[in-house]
Image (cartoon, helix red, strand yellow):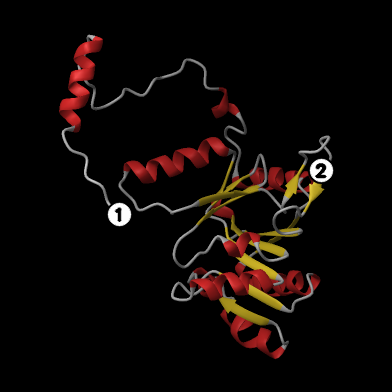
């Protein structure tokens, strides 16, 4: 239910007067003398960022494949087979078609007895059920942080959060153009969308490899509350 705020300005004005100043409608963003976050991987090329991402994937127990759209279908099939095939759930995303994956997903997989379920915004309960029983979830990264090996996923009615964390295995397609040095650039890109009045995702997920935790005695445990295994597929010409 949408509420109505009445007499807000008058209320805030009275408080401001009691404090001895006038209300401010806009805050001036501070300019810091030192901004070390901007120096991390400053000036790195996309190829250099890919190398950083590859190295970081070793630390987060994540497999990484480098390919292009021509070979993407074959490489994706190899990863799916490596995870045992069986069943796959994906977002409803036109990029799968633009990446040349339609034939693999809709024709070849049924012939191989690999079940494919595409997220359906009209079937919320069935979506969850399918995600729970799926062996593999496939998503696409919107922003990728080389420093930490993190894929940023934007949720929407056609891109359910469950696809990335309920299946046993996760495959994340990473267009090379989405790779940035670190969280600094991701936060700025999201802030820019807000300033431009763009409709941003209802939920933004920062996913760093398979599910893991080191809460107990700092001992890493994989697959605690999400996928047990994860593979990133970097698409160089996207």
- Element class at badge 1: loop
- Please indicate whether residue 95 sits to the left or right of residue 51 in the image: left
> Which residue sits at x=76%, y=47%?
60
- The dot on residue 121 is none
Q: Residue at x 60, y 69 (%)?
A: 69
Q: How far apart are labels 1 and 2 at the CA level?
A: 43 Å
Provide the residue designation for mark 2.
220
* Secondary element type, mark 2: loop
The one nearer the camera, 184 or 42, is 184
| Image height of 197 relative to 110, above or below | above
Where is residue 200 drawn, in percent x and y?
40, 52
Residue 66 percent coordinates (x, y):
70, 59
Residue occupied by mark 1: 1
| Label 1 neighbour load within 10 Å: few <14, some 14-19, many 20+ | few
In the image, taking residue 210 as reference, residue 203 lies left or right, namely left
Residue 26, position as x, y percentages in the image? 26, 27
Q: Is residue 94 left or right of residue 181?
A: left
**Quadrant position of the C terminus in the picture:** bottom right
């Amino acid at each position: 239910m949408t509420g109505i705020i009445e007499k807000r300005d008058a209320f805030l004005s009275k408080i401001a007067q009691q404090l001895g100043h006038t209300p401010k409608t806009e805050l001036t963003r501070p300019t810091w003398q030192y901004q070390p976050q901007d120096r991390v991987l400053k000036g790195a090329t996309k190829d250099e960022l890919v190398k950083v991402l590859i190295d970081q994937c070793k630390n987060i127990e994540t497999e990484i494949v480098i390919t292009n759209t021509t070979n993407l279908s074959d490489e994706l099939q190899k990863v799916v087979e490596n995870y045992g095939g069986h069943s796959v759930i994906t977002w409803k995303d036109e990029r799968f078609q633009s990446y040349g994956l339609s034939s693999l997903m809709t024709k070849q997989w049924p012939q191989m007895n690999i079940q494919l379920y595409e997220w359906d915004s009209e079937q919320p309960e069935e979506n969850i059920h399918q995600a729970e029983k799926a062996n593999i979830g496939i998503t696409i990264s919107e922003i990728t942080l080389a420093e930490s090996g993190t894929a940023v996923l934007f949720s929407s009615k056609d891109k359910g959060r469950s696809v990335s964390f309920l299946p046993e295995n996760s495959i994340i397609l990473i267009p090379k153009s989405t790779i940035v040095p670190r969280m600094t650039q991701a936060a700025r890109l999201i802030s820019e969308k807000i300033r431009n009045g763009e409709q941003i995702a209802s939920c933004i997920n920062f996913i760093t490899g398979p599910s893991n935790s080191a809460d107990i005695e700092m001992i890493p445990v994989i697959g605690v509350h999400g996928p047990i295994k994860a593979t990133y597929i970097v698409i160089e010409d996207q």
